[in-house]
């Protein structure tokens, strides 16, 4: 139990006995004001119930807590009760935090987290990086909070966009492969997606010169008509189209797996749209029979959501081919059928907010009782100083290129600092990789998911300020201290902690609360901001508390133990963000 919880329990007991007030949620805050005291209790909500003035009630509570030995001193200022804890409470709290560090409360609930979910017509880019890091980190945080977690992705491996890459390769590829070009498979296929768009635009221009308007030219372009025919051929299982599809997708999967491995994310389950879109069609047939959907004259299937403040939504094209909604309906049903899950989280950008609003509403109207257990973790887009990215025009920031750039920048910075002498070249390379990717991940995750963000690679890898390397460096500094001291945990007697140690203990005791809040809000930014604050507090302690020169063994042992627990908390916090640590930087 942390100090804050101990105060809450003590005050609740006093209120229950003295004033017959039960089940009241108290607001106990760490005191960051100029007033004396370690914690502040907000008195105002209690005044009416206790029928006492704020000053009288605050003084009565303070005296009672002092008599119980919970605090040393208190003061009441304008309805706030400020409490100064005794040293024994801090030391006891420190021991409890250490003993409970690896203990998790089992929530006995399973949450499925979907992230990544790429298309097999192009490699992963900067936007996918934020998606993957966010989804993976949320899964890590939920696990730490005591949930069972299933990490999943749905690979969009079929559809008109896939056929565009296939057709372009068939027309212009001259049989080239990843082996003959030396390119990763996802990059090779992505090149043909760009090639398709280049030819498509050229044909549109030609048709416009012949007198067609823009819309007619887009629809009548020969290359788009061929792609649409290829999609129909695929859905009708035409052998040569299916073979080409399987070959090119296998190239892409091999490329994706390399990217995922370097990024440090993984999945427990993988689903494929080529399987689930058929399930969606069955659901739509059932929905038609129930009157949830209706058909238009062109045979397309729709749902009318105008009474719900939305609009009419297409769920199946007139020619019988699927749209994204078809697939998403089938996937959701299949996931709840195959897994005993209590919540399903979709990690998808905010440009799809409306899509998920409609999806969840359709599933409710179809009568699935678990439709209320669906959640869209909507996040803002990532932009660069140069502006937005466009896949079709080939102006995206490639995920692999970005990771390599971060690695090279970390290498350059580390070599400038010159602190890795004595390590083997393999150990140095590992350090550059961990620091470079740590910088990328931390910069992405310290921003609230709902906000759009500007990613600046140079700023992210600074060894000072609110960055991954700054936090990793503090961890390495603590490891150096523990090694120099030949740290072995021992009893530190009746040590009296100083002010900076008390502040560290309070921050360390907040870790589990932070994890709970991050799990509730699905925001890794809570963990990122917490560990940054912890590191700043520790660095202040480190500067003002020399350890190696201490003659008092109890003081030395306590300072080493608080350093060790800080390092463990930094490491666990970073791991929740998918970030590793190094012992030297």
Image (tube, rainbow, N blue to C red):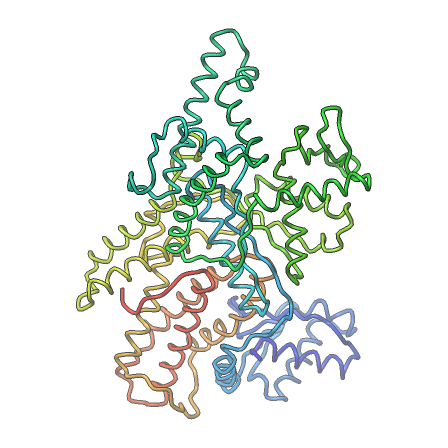
Q: Nearer the viewer, residue 552 or 52?
A: 552
- Specify the farthest residue to the left: 422
Q: Position of residue 341 (x, y in %)?
A: 65, 61
Q: Residue furthest top?
A: 211
- Which residue is painted at 40% across and 44% down in the image? 251
Relative to residue 443, is residue 278 depicted above or below? above
Q: Residue at x 43, y 45 (%)?
A: 250
Indicate the position of residue 94 as horizontal and vertical percent values: 48, 81
- Of residues 115 and 553, the one drawn nearer to the viewer in this rendering: 115
Q: Classify residue 513 as left or right of residue 438.
A: right
Q: Position of residue 182 (x, y in %)?
A: 28, 42
Q: Is residue 227 above or below residue 418?
A: above
Q: Residue at the location (45% across, 14% down)?
A: 205
| The C terminus: image quadrant | bottom left
Q: Quadrant of residue 307?
A: top right
Foreground of the two, 311 or 583 = 311
Q: Quadrant of the N terminus?
A: bottom right
Residue 418, by quadrant, is: bottom left
Image coords of residue 424 (percent x, y): 19, 66
Residue positioned 75% across, 36% down in the render: 303
Judge whether 146 appears above or below 96 on screen.
above
Q: Is residue 199 left or right of residue 542?
A: right
Total labels drawn:
0
Q: Is residue 24 left or right of residue 380?
A: right
Q: Nearer the viewer, residue 585 or 223?
A: 223
């Amino acid at each position: 139990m942390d100090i804050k919880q101990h105060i809450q329990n003590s005050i609740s007991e006093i209120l229950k006995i003295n004033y017959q007030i039960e089940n009241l949620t108290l607001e106990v805050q760490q005191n960051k004001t100029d007033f004396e005291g370690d914690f502040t209790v907000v008195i105002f909500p209690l005044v009416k119930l206790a029928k006492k003035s704020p000053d009288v009630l605050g003084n009565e509570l303070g005296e009672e807590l002092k008599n119980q030995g919970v605090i040393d001193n208190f003061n009441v200022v304008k309805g706030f009760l400020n409490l100064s804890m005794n040293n024994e409470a801090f030391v006891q709290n420190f021991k409890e935090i250490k003993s409970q560090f690896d203990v998790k409360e089992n929530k006995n609930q399973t949450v499925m987290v979907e992230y990544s979910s790429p298309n097999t017509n192009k490699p992963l880019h900067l936007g996918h990086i934020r998606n993957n890091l966010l989804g993976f980190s949320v899964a890590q945080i939920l696990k730490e909070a005591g949930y069972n977690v299933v990490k999943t992705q749905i690979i969009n491996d079929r559809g008109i966009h896939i056929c565009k890459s296939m057709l372009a390769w068939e027309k212009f590829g001259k049989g080239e492969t990843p082996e003959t070009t030396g390119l990763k498979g996802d990059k090779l296929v992505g090149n043909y997606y760009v090639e398709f768009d280049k030819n498509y635009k050229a044909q549109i221009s030609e048709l416009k010169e012949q007198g067609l308007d823009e819309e007619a030219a887009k629809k009548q372009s020969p290359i788009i008509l061929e792609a649409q025919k290829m999609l129909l051929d695929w859905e009708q299982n035409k052998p040569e189209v299916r073979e080409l599809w399987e070959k090119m997708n296998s190239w892409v999967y091999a490329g994706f797996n390399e990217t995922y491995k370097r990024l440090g994310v993984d999945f427990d389950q993988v689903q494929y749209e080529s399987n689930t879109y058929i399930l969606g069609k069955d659901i739509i047939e059932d929905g038609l029979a129930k009157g949830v959907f209706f058909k238009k004259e062109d045979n397309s299937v729709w749902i009318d959501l105008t009474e719900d403040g939305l609009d009419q939504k297409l769920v199946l094209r007139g020619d019988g081919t699927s749209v994204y909604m078809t697939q998403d309906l089938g996937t959701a049903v299949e996931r709840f059928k195959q897994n005993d899950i209590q919540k399903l989280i979709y990690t998808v950008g905010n440009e799809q907010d409306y899509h998920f609003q409609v999806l969840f509403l359709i599933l409710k109207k179809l009568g699935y009782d678990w439709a209320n257990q669906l959640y869209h973790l909507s996040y803002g887009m990532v932009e660069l100083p140069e502006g937005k990215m466009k896949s079709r025009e080939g102006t995206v920031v490639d995920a692999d290129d970005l990771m390599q750039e971060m690695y090279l920048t970390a290498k350059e910075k580390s070599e400038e600092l010159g602190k890795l002498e004595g390590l083997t070249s393999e150990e140095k390379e590992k350090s550059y990789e961990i620091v470079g990717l740590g910088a990328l991940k931390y910069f992405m995750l310290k921003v609230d998911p709902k906000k759009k963000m500007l990613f600046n690679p140079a700023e992210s890898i600074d060894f000072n300020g609110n960055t991954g390397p700054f936090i990793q460096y503090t961890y390495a500094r603590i490891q150096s201290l523990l090694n120099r001291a030949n740290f072995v945990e021992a009893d530190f007697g009746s040590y009296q902690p100083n002010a900076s140690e008390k502040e560290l203990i309070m921050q360390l005791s907040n870790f589990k609360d932070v994890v709970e809040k991050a799990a509730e809000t699905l925001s890794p930014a809570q963990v990122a901001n917490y560990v940054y604050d912890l590191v700043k507090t520790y660095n202040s302690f480190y500067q003002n508390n020399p350890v190696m020169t201490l003659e008092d063994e109890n003081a030395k042992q306590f300072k080493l133990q608080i350093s060790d627990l800080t390092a463990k908390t930094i490491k666990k916090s970073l791991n929740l963000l998918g970030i590793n640590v190094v012992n030297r930087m």
